[in-house]
Amino acid sequence: MKKTIGDLTKECSDMQKDWIQKQTQLLSISTETDRLKTNLNENKTKKMVLEQKKLRIEGQLESQQKEIRELEHNMKHLRFDMDRMNSAVVKHDNKSQELANSNQMMETEFVQKLKEIESRCLEMERSVGVVKDDKNQMNQDILESERQVLLWERKITLEKEMQLVVEQSLEDAPGTPGRPRSPRSPPRSPARRAGSGLGSPSRRRSKQDEDDDSDDPE
């Protein structure tokens, strides 16, 4: 009986120890469970945050993809515009080169024409100088001719007056064979004598033409 009680006591003691150990394990498991529940809640919260972030990122991604499609579309238009602008630049360069060549040719022709005009102007200036010199010489010749005409007219007038005086003296001399006595012309006044040697060139020339038949006064 004692042995049975001892065995039972020992068994009870073992069972108590086992229970205490299992209680300790249960406490550890409860603690671990609580920790896992806490981690699970935290993970759920993180999951919700991550899902919201995912939705936000997906929205941003869709918006960026839309912007990328728009940018690609705009890039196509820009490439088309660039190609057109490059073609226009090439045409502009060709036209600029043509205009530069044309301007160079026009400038060369203009310079050549300007040189020809300058040479003509110099030639005309020389011709004008020669004409002026000829004109001055002609004026001097005319003045000299007029002076000679005046001298000759004065000589002719003096010769005529001397002839009149000689004829008058011959008519008045006694014993001179009779000539029909012409009416005595009054002697000319000094003013009239001086006036007969002056006057317009046309009048002097006509006077000289009238006296061409007279003798040379010299």
Image: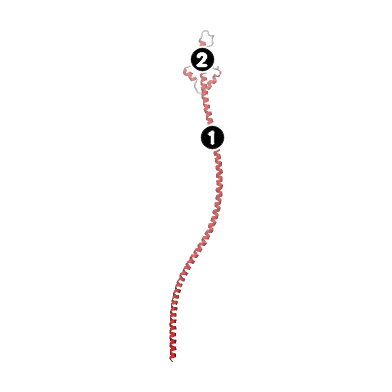
Mark 1 residue element: helix
**Quarter placement of the C terminus:** top right
Q: Residue at x 55, y 53 (%)?
A: 86
Which callout, 2 or 1, points at the residue further toward the start of the chain? 1
Q: CA distance from mark 2 to mark 1?
A: 59 Å
Residues at marks 2 and 1 touching, judged by CB atoms closer than 8 Å: no
Q: Looking at the image, which is closer to me, 206 or 42?
A: 42
- Which mark's residue is nearer the viewer, 2 or 1? 1
Residue 133 in the image, given as x and y percentages of width and height:
53, 29
Q: In percent of the image, x 54 and y 55: which residue is there?
A: 82
Does residue 94 lie above or below 190 as drawn?
below
- Residue 64 placed where, x, y %? 50, 63
Circle 1: residue type: Leu
In what element is the residue under mark 2?
helix
Q: Quadrant of residue 102?
A: top right
Q: Which residue is mark 1?
A: 122
The residue tagged 2 is 162
Q: Is residue 183 above or below residue 117?
A: above
Q: Position of residue 131 (x, y in %)?
A: 53, 30
Name the amino acid, label 2: Met
Residue 45 occupies quadrant:
bottom left
